[in-house]
Image (tube, grey):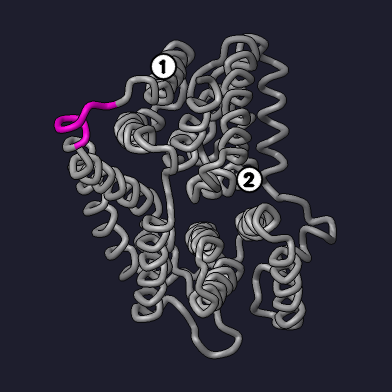
Amino acid sequence: MTLLRFKQETIVSIGVVSFIIAVTAALPLTSAGMRGVSEGVRIFALFSLFVSFLMLTIKFRLQPSLLVSVVAFTSVFSYGSLLAVIYGGHLTAFKFLPVTFVVVSAGLVMFSQRRIVIGPLEAKILVIYFAVFFLLTVALGGFRLEFPPGFLFEVQTGNYGSMVSYGQGVTKFFGLGAILTAFLGSHERKTTMRWVLTTLMLMFLVLSLLGGARGDAIATVLTISLLYSLKTPIRLIVFVCIVLFFATLFISVEDFILLRRLEGLMSGGGLGAREELYADAVGLLSAKPRCVMFGCGFDYYQAYYGLPAGLYPHNFLLEFLIAFGAPLTSFLLVGFLIGLVRSLLTRDGIDGFLLIVIYFTLIYLKSGSVISGWLFVTGLFYYFGIGVQ
């Protein structure tokens, strides 16, 4: 029985790690070379995920009581898809939905078989993954090592010579690396290893900040601060001091994009086009009471204003309200928040996946589409399942 349990745990661990890699491998794109690497790793991770899923469902008995999240996800997204057909939602959404259904469902089945989704073992593997991707980025010419260091971005549209100044994907990717390394360090008892992990966490944090995306970088700092505040407050104080020191060190460096963009925000530059998207979303809800009550389906916002699929509301709350309506959105959010609180207060300890979900929840308040946001959607429905049980 112990051997059988071990084998099931191993399959779940492989599936969990494969899922995280599959949904993040496309984030750190800086060059054509990294694009090829990311696509290859993503395909392999998806293959590994579905092999793990098949082995788990065929060989072992799943726990039905833990599959509430799967039923909730498929029901809610089927409802959003049906409304999109009825009200003429943007057809582009339907290119992503089948894949979203399959990947998120597989992830939820994996996650629902254990109380701690990402423990120290899974975190170690993922930290190695983040480190290897950084080394590949350097080797493929996507990072400048001389001072001031920085990423060398290329637009991934076929015109690889066109340069951009920052990358949300890069900031997210290495932000995840910093968060999981901090999580791993919080479980380490050996002083020497704890210092090694702290140094590695700071390296990932610097890389995340160098990515230049404001909201994603701030979310990284807030998530690590939350972890340290729950563990040892003295670490929180030291961490904040280090962040301030780093900001002071680079404040006069013209090429440090993050500070330049934060200065623009603080000087009244606002959130740019996002403010218009938010205002249009609120205007739609005001003009269409049926959307508020019952929802209007996926991508109705784009269809209503005649916008391309990429111009979604950039706020998951507004997107949920338009797609599913206020009653269903409220039910989902309450269940989700209860699940988060229950998991934070559990005696099993903080789950690394909990930190990831908090991180992406902060990010999706200002960007990201729920249709293609596999990691965020999986986390939302996983913790919703915990909240309503």
Point out residue 57 in the picture as x, y percentages from the top left corner: 20, 30
Relative placement, left or right, of 301 versus 298 is right
Is 58 inside the magenta-drawn segment? yes
Between 342 and 295, the residue placed more toward the observer is 342
The amino acid beneath tag 2 is Leu
Neighbourhood count class around disc 2 (C-alpha, 10 Å): few under 14, some 14–19, many 20 upward? some
Residue holding disc 2: 362
Point out residue 334 in the picture as x, y percentages from the top left corner: 63, 24
Q: Quadrant of the N terminus?
A: top left
Q: Eyeballing the image, is 63 above or below 364?
A: above
Question: The magenta stretch spans which residues?
Answer: 56-62
Q: Residue furthest bottom?
A: 146
Q: Eyeballing the image, is 294 above or below 270?
A: above
Relative placement, left or right, of 109 versus 204 is left
Residue drawn at x 19%, y 44% is 3
Residue drawn at x 79%, y 56% is 269
Relative placement, left or right, of 272 versus 348 is right
Relative placement, left or right, of 174 versus 64 is right
Q: Is residue 248 visible?
A: yes
Tell me, yes or no, whether the two marked residues, 2 and 1, touch with CB atoms within 8 Å: no
Residue holding disc 1: 75
